[in-house]
Amino acid sequence: MTVTGRLVALVALGVVPVVLIGEFYDRALEALLVWIALVVSLVVIDLVAAASPRRLRIERTLPARVRLGESATSTLFLTNTGRRMLRAVVRDAWQPSAGPSTARQPVAIPAAERRGLTLTLTPFRRGERRTERITVRSTGPLGLAARQATLTAPGRIRVLPPFNARKHLPSRLARLRELDGRASVMIRGQGTEFDSLREYVRGDDVRSIDWRATARHSDVMVRTWRPERDRRVVIVIDTGRTQAARIDDEPRIDTAFESALLLAALATRAGDRVDVILYDRRLRGRVHGASGPELLSRMVDVMAPIDPDLIEMDWTAVPGLVRQVTTQRSLVVLATAIDAPGISRELMAIVPQLTRDHTVVVSSVTDPDVLAGVHRRGDREEVYRAAAAERALLDAARVTTVLKRFGADVITGSPAELPPALADRYIALKAAGRL
Amino acid sequence: MSAPATPATEADAVTETPRLRTTLRRRLFWIGAIVLAILGALFTVFSSASGIPDGERFSVGNAGASGSRAVAEVLRQQGVDVVEASTLEAAQSAVDAAGGRAGILFSDASGYLDQDGRDAVRALAEGGADLVLVEPGSDELESMTDGIANAGAAEDSSSVAAGCTLPAAERAGTISQPSWAYRLLEAGEAGAASAGTDTVTCFAAGGDSFALLQQPAGDGTVTVLGAGDALTNGSVALQGNAALVLGLLGTHETLVWYQPGYEDFDGATPTLGELTPGWVTPVILVLLLTTVAAGLWRGRRFGPVVVENLPVTVRASETMEGRARLYARQSAHGRALDALRIGTISRLTAALNLPRYASVVEVSRSVANSTGRPVDEVHDILVGAVPRSERELLEYSDRLLVLEQQVAANRPR
């Protein structure tokens, strides 16, 4: 039960009769008591006459998924199963980060009818966003008091990673097609698998002329090459504590997801098979054996609810995980943070095991703040800051040097640069036939 | 992808809010406890008679030794209408209601009543009432009697005989020791009786002082009673006390028991309470109720609070900032400059296309070649000089930057 502002006004209005009757008949106290009795009886009448908020049937229509940054429409259908007209305010208790457009919606439902309440959700956090219950405040005909009840009506929406890096996809795909022999100009060295023979056209590399075929045909024939297909790409994403740190107001893990999505989109178009492992000390998520559009949708689905845990990444298990996926030579991408030798000791320890069998790329986000800090030396604070930034860069450089010496490739970049940089590296590796 | 499917999830509306009945049943213990506590408090208040005990002397409501409930009750049983009055207006209206012919008991030990009030009381006696002044002070004697003055405390004696023809005193015979004695003023003394002395004096208490004096006043009489103890519950039963007071007070069908209270004091200027209109308190109550209603209106929560786990927000550059502050707090200029130099040297090595493991000497020689500055100076900037203060740290940091810029500018393309 609750009261409305109208009741407050009505009680306050009691001043008028109390003053008038007190002034002219000297019966102020009696007037007050009568007024209170009147207000109380009106409230009771209103409460009794209000439709029961409990007699509702609830249905929800809600998209299962929405990409972060986009909006979804949630519709709540309420059927009044009571015998009275329901005039109510309804609150659908979404979690704040689901970004509901409004918290409270007025609704009037005649007996045995159904009404839909539409709510626009604009989530601002990735993951599973939920609502567990709705609260209905049914006001009486006088609008003085209301009956209130909370009803269970669970709803959930999965907020997927935004995949902003998809804007880089068309240009990278174009470059991939150039490699693939579909583009007009063939350059030897782009791809290593023999594809077919065709007639020589001007501009072709003379080194690719197949003299034996030329002899058989009456025309000059060239061999065409295409990049290898059906290679494997294994993306291991670290979900440990270091991935929780924010760079440019984006957690490292989100950048890792963006890079992984772009790489996977590219690799699956290039005909490679992509596996994704999300791991810290336990397997947090895994995408295996999917390709094409299904791969991406499964990846975003797996990634959506995963937040970094505040535990240390266990790198020692990673070679085993990769071995479970494939024993074939493949491209292993480790999406992690390269900070300081102390933190990255385990990573450095296992990289040789991986590089023995695979091509390993370690991708890490660098902080633009640190890079900018190095050259800003206006005053005392800034010089100390520049020194600390140099120290941080030096720490990272030491780890990078070690990783490179062990045969791994290291890619660093700001959150905006890292996904295309990783895609470019993939294309370069593919072109060089190193997959 | 944003809205691939719109599955309708139908949910049976399970109500989480308990019904009023359920709430009441659940809270039964506490509701019962509160009701019991209130009842207990009320019982305690009412069982201790009437809130604040009446301890006033001669008060009708006082059942203690100094009170006069016994006398009042006996009078009531005898058919006398005992009207308590604590204000002059009440006393006047009670006397008026009895047609002016009533007994008035007047006792004002605290002296609340002023001169005008005392005159008004005497006027009642002159109008036909029988006024009994119990242990009056000199002010009262002066304004309400004719030629009677205080004679101090009465002499010690276990009993005093009437010694007069006043019927009440005669019936009493003897009374116990009176507290105060009074005397008639001699002719010639200031304030002596103006119109002869038809004053009856009883119960001689040494010399020419008496415990009871009665004189006519207009149509009524004024009686001065020095033996106030005779009225009290503790002493009324001694000797002829009861006969005396009952005889004195029971002369009329109505007895106004007038003990001036606080309201009679300073009655000339009305108090703030009297000036405010009667509706002010109810209006304040209305406003209070409005506040309560507004509190209920705004304070009622619209369903339970939604709980959400929020991620920790940690900026990755925190560690760098922290290290910078540590350097600054410790004034670690040497260490800070080392870090800056290592950074500069590695960038210079890259800029000058030197091997990655080139020594500092090689780097400084290269830089000197490139910029045209002396090798010693370059070496000094890159490793040699030891900063002794923060000012020098800033200076060397700037020099390092300048060196980098010069190398970058002279870089062969």
Image (spheres, grey):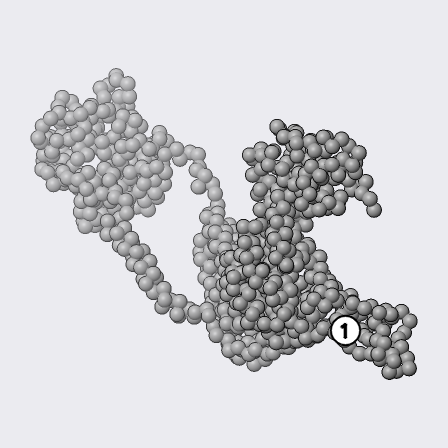
The residue positioned 84% from the left and 69% from the top of the image is: A207
Where residue B11 sits in the image (x, y, percent)? 53, 77
Query: For the residue carrying disc 1, how many other residues have a C-alpha within 10 Å: few (<14), some (14-19), or many (20+)?
Result: many
Amino acid type, mark 1: Arg
The residue positioned 69% from the left and 58% from the top of the image is: A418
Task: Indicate the quadrant where residue B184 lies.
Answer: top left
Visible residue check, residue A14: no
Where residue B369 sits in the image (x, y, percent)? 78, 36
- Depicted B254 relative to depicted B146: above or below: below
Check the residue under mark 1 and report the chain it is in.
A
Q: Which one is nearer the viewer's eye here, A165 or B145? A: A165
Element at badge 1? strand
Where residue B227 sits in the image (x, y, percent)? 17, 32
Q: Is residue B186 left or right of residue B318?
A: left
The residue positioned 58% from the left and 60% from the top of the image is: A352
Q: Is residue A164 left or right of residue A218?
A: left
The residue positioned 17% from the left and 40% from the top of the image is: B65
Residue position for label 1: A226
Q: Is residue B315 left or right of residue A166?
A: left
Task: Indicate the quadrant where residue B397 lies.
Answer: top right
- Depicted A300 relative to depicted A244: above or below: below
Q: Quadrant of the N terminus of chain B?
A: bottom right
Q: Which one is nearer the viewer's eye here, B207 or A2? A: A2
Where residue B136 sits in the image (x, y, percent)? 25, 30
Q: Which one is nearer the viewer's eye here, B329 or B14? A: B329
